Image: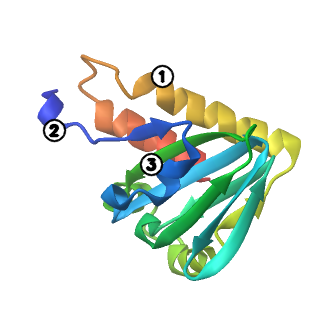
Amino acid sequence: MDKINRIRIIYSCDFREIGNPAYKDWCVHAVCIDGEGSFVYNERLFRMARGNVAVIAHPELVRDIAASEGMKVEIVIAPMYFLVGQLPKNNPSIGGGIFLFSNPIMAMSGSEAERLIDDIHRIRTRIDEGGNVFYNETIGSLLLTMMY
């Protein structure tokens, strides 16, 4: 598949990426592995700590990002239209989207966070994969697994 047709997915360990205005109309999934951080989203202050996940559908609304010296995160950023296109047609995403807009932080148990980190690592290892004619489908299925 020609690289021009490949969907662009971003992987990062930089907490500041959650508020990058270049990702307007993209969705950020960030898991805190260690330390803590905070940010203002939709005019409200949110805090993240180990085992917390942030799902930010409007990164352009994030500001005042702060992180402890030892904060470690893993982040996947993808175009919103691509993520929504992966969801089944009968999904309740509207209600979930409204909830996440008002509270983008979710606490996870240790095993839940580890599974999410594993999902992110699978995406990270496939992002630069060359020669896969089913690249978008492969990345889409991995993103769908991460979202579930």
13 vs 134, nearest the viewer: 13
Mark 3, secondary structure of its residue: strand
Residue 22 position in % (x across, y down): 31, 56
Amino acid type of the residue tagged 1 in the rendering: Thr
Residue 35 position in % (x across, y down): 79, 43
125 vs 103, nearest the viewer: 103
Residue 1 position in % (x across, y down): 16, 27
Position of 116 compared to 140: left or right? right
According to the image, label 3 marks what residue?
Answer: 77
Between tags 3 and 1, which lies in front? 3
- C-alpha gap between disc 2 and disc 3: 18 Å
Amino acid type of the residue tagged 2 in the rendering: Asn
Q: Which mark is residue 125?
A: 1
Q: Which mark is residue 5?
A: 2
- C-alpha gap between disc 1 and disc 2: 19 Å
Mark 1, secondary structure of its residue: helix
**Residue depicted at x 71% and y 46%:** 32
